[in-house]
Amino acid sequence: MNKKVTAMDVARLAGVSQSSVSRAFSKNASISNKKRKLILDAAEKLGYQPNAIARGLITNQSRIIGIVMRDVQNPFYPEVLEKFYSRLSEEGYQIMFINSQNDEIQEHEVSQLIEYSVEGVIITDALLTSAAVQKLNRNGISVVLFNRYISDSMSNAVICNNFSAGQKIGQYLLDTGHRHLGFISGPANTSTSLDRSRGFMDTLQKHGIEFIPMEDGSFTYQGGFAAAKNLMKHHDEIDALFCANDIMAFGAIDYLTTAGYRIPEDISVIGFDNVKMADWSSYTLTTWQQPVDEMIHQAVKLMLEDINGQQEEPEMNFVDGCLIERASVKDRR
Amino acid sequence: MNKKVTAMDVARLAGVSQSSVSRAFSKNASISNKKRKLILDAAEKLGYQPNAIARGLITNQSRIIGIVMRDVQNPFYPEVLEKFYSRLSEEGYQIMFINSQNDEIQEHEVSQLIEYSVEGVIITDALLTSAAVQKLNRNGISVVLFNRYISDSMSNAVICNNFSAGQKIGQYLLDTGHRHLGFISGPANTSTSLDRSRGFMDTLQKHGIEFIPMEDGSFTYQGGFAAAKNLMKHHDEIDALFCANDIMAFGAIDYLTTAGYRIPEDISVIGFDNVKMADWSSYTLTTWQQPVDEMIHQAVKLMLEDINGQQEEPEMNFVDGCLIERASVKDRR
DNA sequence: TTTTAAAATAAAAGCGTTTACATTTTTCGC
DNA sequence: GCGAAAAATGTAAACGCTTTTATTTTAAAA
């Protein structure tokens, strides 16, 4: 456990002042090429790495972004995490990972973020109280909600246009000749699930369908499995099932298959997210693709703008996505 | 973007010295209860949070652990990540997440870790050069390898006893009356895949089987799918397939099913990891369970010991795991 | 009381940087 | 060459804490 080598050590070896060492490592600082090379060589020889902690203290910029997730087990989120990592890396940021254990993001988790002076926080699939948002804001920490929003707060958010996607899915199912629809929702306190459901119902109502059977599948495989079971027990007539995310759709399909229904001959199933597995040949799930790359691009853009103070007002960006047709929906016309 | 409130602010409000504020927030410091309460109240009122960056600078302890992963898309790893988060949280550590994009951990990724003075690094499913390990060690950063090891280096590691697991899987397949085995491996440069394969072959050889067909499935679904296809093309006689991880097993099963083979009637398939999906009714995969909780427990224990200097020598801990029998293997006796 | 030890507090140094400011060196027009 | 402006370098002051050291207050002993 050797002592860490500091800028002072480099300075001594190179025979310059410590501030010159600092300048040698900063992009647009006033320093001669000759001296810079001298210093860099000395640094190389000693294996010097600038200390980001010390830098953060003086510059008041940690260059750390917190990412808080909850449902890491849903394959959608690892993908998101990976992509956020790439984008933020490119921008020279590190990621502090928080896996919120509870539905709602906890006080102490917010505190951790603040204590480490993260410059921004990306909230993914976790519930945020307005109090938490305020606390973050009060500490000058930018917040971007990813794939959810809270109406009363003033936070940046980028979300798939779940309402319109829901509408289009409803339309698609109707267009392909389905008449007995069912819906498996996520938790009732998520904007994601709510908007998808509202859009879906909106279309149905326009076609004179006022009520359809629904079950909460809590965004999990087991939930989807159980929800499908309940649904079919009381509504054997169902010919199409819209699941508010893919993972529930897999659960539903697995239940239906074991119960002897054929997909899509007997029942069509449609999901939401287009996770990698949707393409697996066991499922070949027709689903709604969230344009993850674009969403992440925008989220990072908002974050950076906010951090750099180029933002007047928090923005909410909606992106559309599109239907991916595979083999889990049958054309019944 | 309010200015951050510092210990000095609290001190002023409470009418004490700044050092007393510091003491009020530290566990076993010499301070009267009266004053502590006074200070804590003032801090509460101002919404003061100690600045971990500043603390880290003076104490030379960042309380950050780096976790580097590569194949986050393999569902095994999100689970691991989540559990590491819980354990390390309990110990008061934060996680800096690195998603290595390449097979081999990159120079600049190691640098990032060093710049942020992480106290330790957990390496999961990523390849580490000895040079990288040395660089970390030279900077006093503890390294624990999770689920892999490198023989030439002196790093802590906790791994499933892949060799013996491979042996037992071979035995199990033989015991259940299989005579034409095939193997789908991971990348040839991973100790994980190699040891599983060696153990497997070891058993087979003891039973007079010297050679079996093998394909590299590179630890991915697509790889497993393709590998199964290649294997069956040339070796139609195969009656059992051992896949070096679950995700490849899923790919293999999906190929086999679409090709008209019945699992397990025509071909038995066995995986490795016991990810959540293995229990899904589409797969009901018989597989080897890695004792993740125990592995993580040990990894964190090693890490902490190393950080606290209670370690003479790097340790390599092997854990066993056990076979989980589901429905993808048929008893052919 | 007075003396002395112990406990609580304050003052100040220092962690490894960046950066404003002061000083020195270089460059360049005349 | 000279002088002035520009560029390069050095000096020193922060940043927000912890911790050592010095000082004050309190408690205990006499």
Image (cartoon, coloured by chain):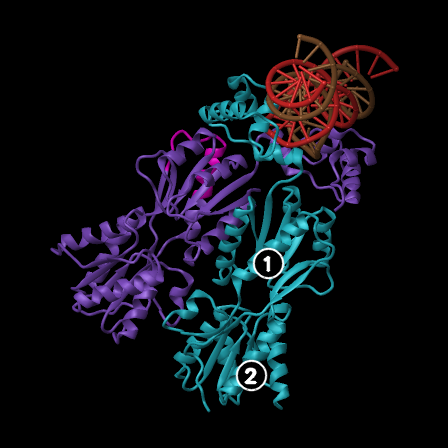
Chain colours: A purple, B cyan, C brown, D red
Do tag 1 and tag 2 residues touch (Cβ < 8 Å)?
Answer: no
Q: How many marks?
A: 2
Label 1 sits on residue: B298
> At x 19% / y 50%, what residue is drawn?
A202
In the image shown, does B7 or B81 lie closer to the viewer? B7
Q: Which mark is residue B171?
A: 2
Image location (x, y in percent) of residue B241:
50, 81
Magenta segment boundaries in residue numbering: A299-315
Q: Nearer the viewer, mark 1 or mark 2?
A: 1
- Tell me, yes or no, if residue A217 can be seen here: yes
In the image shown, does A191 or C12 lie closer to the viewer? C12
> At x 75% / y 30%, what residue is drawn?
A18
> At x 28% / y 52%, what residue is drawn?
A165
Q: CA distance from mark 1 to mark 2?
A: 28 Å
Give the vertical position of D9 relative to A229 (above or below).
above
Q: Which mark is residue B181?
A: none
Q: Earlier in the sequence, mark 1 or mark 2?
A: 2
- Amino acid under label 2? Gln
Q: Is residue A256 magenta?
A: no
Image location (x, y in percent) of residue A218:
31, 55
